[in-house]
Amino acid sequence: MKILTKHILFILLIFLLLAGIFSLFEDPFERTEEISLSELVQRIENVKEITVAGNAVSLVFNDGTKKETRKEPETGLIETLRNYGVSVETIREIDIKTKTEPGAWVGPALMVFLPFLIFIVFFFFIFKRMKAGASQAFDFTKAKAKLFGGKGQPEEKTSFDDVAGLTEVKEELKEVVDFLKNPKKYLKMGAKIPRGVLLLGAAGVGKTLLARAVAGEAKVPFFSISGSEFVEMFVGVGSSRVRNLFSTAKKAAPAIIFIDELDAIGRRRGTGIGGGHDEREQTLNQILVEMDGFERETNIIIIAATNRGDVLDPALLRPGRFDRKIILEAPDIKGRKEVLKLHTIKMPLASDVKLREVAERTPGFSGADVANVANEAAILAARKNKEKIFQEDFLESIEKVLLGPERKSHILSKKEKEIAAYHEAGHALATTLLPGGEPIRKISIIARGMAAGYTIHLPAEEKRMKTKKEFENELAMFLGGYCAEKLIFKEVTTGASNDLSKASSLARRLVKEYGMSSLGPVAYGENNELTFLGREISEQKNYSEKVAAKIDQEVSNFIKKAEKKSIEVLRKNKKTLEKVARVLIKKETIEKEEFEKLIKKEIKEKPKMKMKKV
């Protein structure tokens, strides 16, 4: 109410000031003829009445007509008339009146009060800014955590029912929520409250969604903050914010603190970047103290999420701080189907939609990727003015999420189209006809994203472990397009660059990480602790230059062996390669059923992979 009154008074003051200024320039609507002083003196005997208002002189003649004139400044009218030779008797016969000029007081008043008014307004704003700056200075060291579920605060509406799959993970977190709700049940058995729960997993697997579900289920104050919000350019601010956050949470206990992207402040100390007094390290030290200091009976649980668990400081990961480490992985086919069901509840699905098939076509997709597939399908259907979402919309959205949108404007020349067709046909045949090969879902030479063409092959079953033979066949599949170009055109193009990069990377992992080369079961190379922008600055070698040369030779052997295997398969089935390529040039896209018809004979003669008994 006080603020409103101040605003009204301020507005009224502005209006008064404007009214005074406009009155200085008052311009009457009725215009009167103006005459000179000389003419007035000549006709003075016919003047009945004179009204003086400042320098303006209004005249009324005997016949009732009105005229105007102006007298000399700083000189009275009577004195002016006498200077022009008008007698005193003539002047006495005229009714002379004096009138104050409208707004004449405003000028002097403004001269006196306007400077004071300007100073008052100026200092008012200065003090207001200073007051705001002082309050901001005190708030600067306060944690900027968002509070859910506290007194007078909004509650998070997400629950565990809104999280598809992740059954074991939800059970772990339900136990944490139950501990906060019913601590006596656990304390009676001698159990101690877990200090922290660390959610580890790749981007998009549902870490933050699970934290929101915990906030919705716990019904206790839930403080949510990002790791990057602690650290500022000023020394000591980060640790001060940590103290403030934990102090606020202790007052609201039982409570949960959620720190998203923990790696922003929890990176390993002593890496040599930033020095021993690095602000980030001081913030981390304060978190370590707050999580496991002398105060042990605090009814607070810290939940943190990160996709870079490899860079976290060991002191954070020990029992007593983050007691539980929950690993979140990309969902399996059952989990992907549940995610699709959850995200298509409110969507008008057509009768031909098979969510199981969509789930089968998205191996390796995270929960966020699968949700994006459902959303893109809805967008595609709306773009085509459909009333329902059909299966074809889901299948197209998979390709869009996987490879990018179609580039219909990117038209290949006749020669490029032929090369792309043989390249993709080579991939498809090598993938299908090699032992342990995977079924082809689609082949296309329509450009998507950065690819001029693509071959989609999906595993018959999802595997978590692979053998050396399977890896060797995978290398041969990568080189199928390269070998097809070499076999048909006797030369290769830049279209195989991405395939060669993937093949080289896989071959190097076989040697250095998986111990599948002739160098034996030894892991070569260690990642350096120094990181920059999320990437390792360098790799620390734990082997000699002589061994490095052997590693390069082994990588080359794997690639050459895969090339030889791929060439043999394609040369043996050259007629089939040409048949598939011709159909691809004509139709641009081949689906699974049509491809299987084209190579029906070759599939029957395909050698099966034999597994050695151990």
Image (tube, helix red, strand yellow):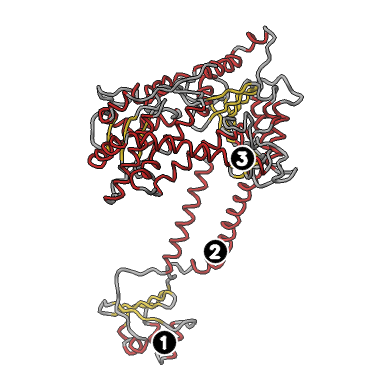
- Residue on which disc 2 sits: 114
- Image x and y of residue 305, in percent: 57, 30
Q: Nearer the viewer, residue 124 or 544?
A: 544
- Image x and y of residue 251, in percent: 66, 25
Q: Which residue lies furthest to the bottom in this view?
A: 85
In what element is the residue under mark 3?
helix
Q: Which of 96 and 416 is in front in this view?
A: 416
**Front label number (2 vs 1):** 2
In this orientation, does residue 573 appear? yes
- Residue on which disc 1 sits: 81
In what element is the residue under mark 2?
helix
Height in image: 261 above or below 69?
above
**Front label number (2 vs 3):** 3
Callouts 2 and 3 close, C-beta under 8 Å: no
Q: Pick whichever of labels 1 and 3 is earlier in the sequence.
A: 1
Q: Residue 609 carries which label?
A: none
**Front label number (1 vs 3):** 3
Q: Which amino acid does label 2 sit on?
A: Leu
Q: Nearer the viewer, residue 510 or 47?
A: 510
Instruction: Identify which residue is drawn at 56% across, 17% down.
Output: 172
Q: Pick whichever of labels 2 and 3 is earlier in the sequence.
A: 2
Q: What residue type is labelled 3?
A: Lys
- Residue on which disc 3 sits: 550
